[in-house]
Image (cartoon, grey):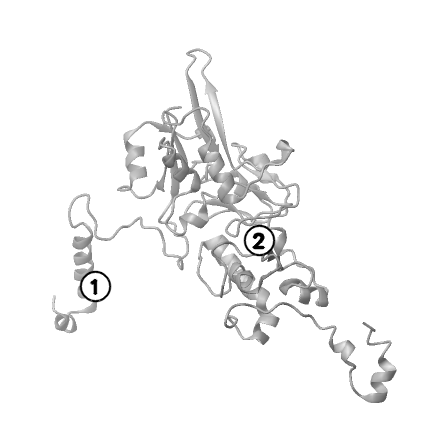
Amino acid sequence: MAAGDTSTLPRREFLGRASALAGLVVSFAPGMRLIDLAAAKPDGEAASAEVRWGMLVDATRCVSGCDACVNACATEHGLEMTDRPEIDAQWIRKVDLIDENSGKEISLPVMCQHCEDAPCVAVCPTGASFRREDGIVLVNKHTCIGCRYCMMACPYKARSFIHINLVGQRTHSPRGKGTVESCTFCVHRVDRDREPACVEACTAAGHQALLFGDLSDNEGELAQRLGEVQTQQLRSDLGTNPGVHYHGL
Amino acid sequence: MGSVWQLLPLIMLTGVLPLSVIADEPLFPRARGERCVEPVGVMRRAHFEFLNHQGQQTVERGIRIGRHSLADCIGCHAARDQNADWIPVSAPGQFCDSCHSYAAVRIDCFSCHRAVPGADQVMGN
């Protein structure tokens, strides 16, 4: 369409034709797009509700005794272990399960499940516990008063309270005494188009048990895989609709 | 240093502030960057509004650009000791502490935020 033509077209008709043309370009060929709808947002843009970040944990690939994801998380966020393990922050835990009847053993990591209907968000008296537009559940430590209601409410026991003064925090992961914290899906990385540290470490360890991506992007690897394998969410009976899905439980 | 009140008769007689009173003003190490992101006068008055605004944008909405990042302040204003180790900006006599002690305003930023530059936050080095 020549640029000159637009002056003779009514505005509405031009917009109609232009959007039809745009549709053509986007659906250029099956399975191929010129514009990637699920691309991570640029640094300067706000998190969008068109994305819902999620994860698939493949318990059939997760190896008992491997704690690469746990260590990567601790390094990324500066979670240091003290000589009082009962007060140590735990953002991601490895859990080994044995079926008493069959003797089948499985191993899987459990972290914040980034629920759509998050109990921690519902109970927070200050609004510090919140769900970002793109589905990542976070604690705004500027407004957290350390009441720990969210810790009581969380069915996954995913949150930790910081009891002692901390030093040596990471620049990208501020954390301190008197506030509650949990897995952030490595939001500082996600905002810059990188995977969470645990996913990277699992892949580097050769297990590929963790797959991170956009649950809303039907063409994306995560949604594709969720369509292929049988998965379940932890305590799905509670209706929290977690963003983390498990295969092989 | 003598307080202003002890020196009040002297000040009234001479009409000038003795040097010892002026020297009580906060002193802190020079920043490394070329210039601040805002004029100094604006920064002195409004730095917390800038920091607060950008903090909210980052935490709640994931907007990670902007000129008023606390990490960037620290990248310019943190000093090194004789062993070339970083001194926290919140340590006595350092950039944040010097004014905040002077103004008797306790800041809570650094119970959570890192008070020395991270590897990728060092400016002008």
Q: Is residue B10 above or below residue B26?
A: below
Residue type at mark 2: give it. Answer: Arg
Residue underneath mark 1: A15
Residue type at mark 1: give it. Answer: Leu
Labels 2, 1: front one: 2
Residue A39 appears in the figure: yes
At x 71% / y 64%, what residue is drawn?
Answer: B101
Of A237 and B96, nearer the camera is B96
Q: In which quarter of the view is residue B43 placed?
A: bottom right
Mark 1: secondary structure = helix
| In the rendered image, residues at marks 2 and 1 fall on the same chain | no
User: Percent position (x, y) of residue A164?
Assistant: 66, 42
Measure how far apart labels 2 and 1 are at the Cα level: 51 Å
Badge 2: few (under 14), some or many (20 or more) residues near its Cα, within 10 Å?
A: many
User: Percent position (x, y) of residue A71?
Assistant: 49, 36
Q: Quadrant of the C terminus of chain A?
A: top left
Q: Which mark is residue B114?
A: 2
Residue A112 appears in the figure: no
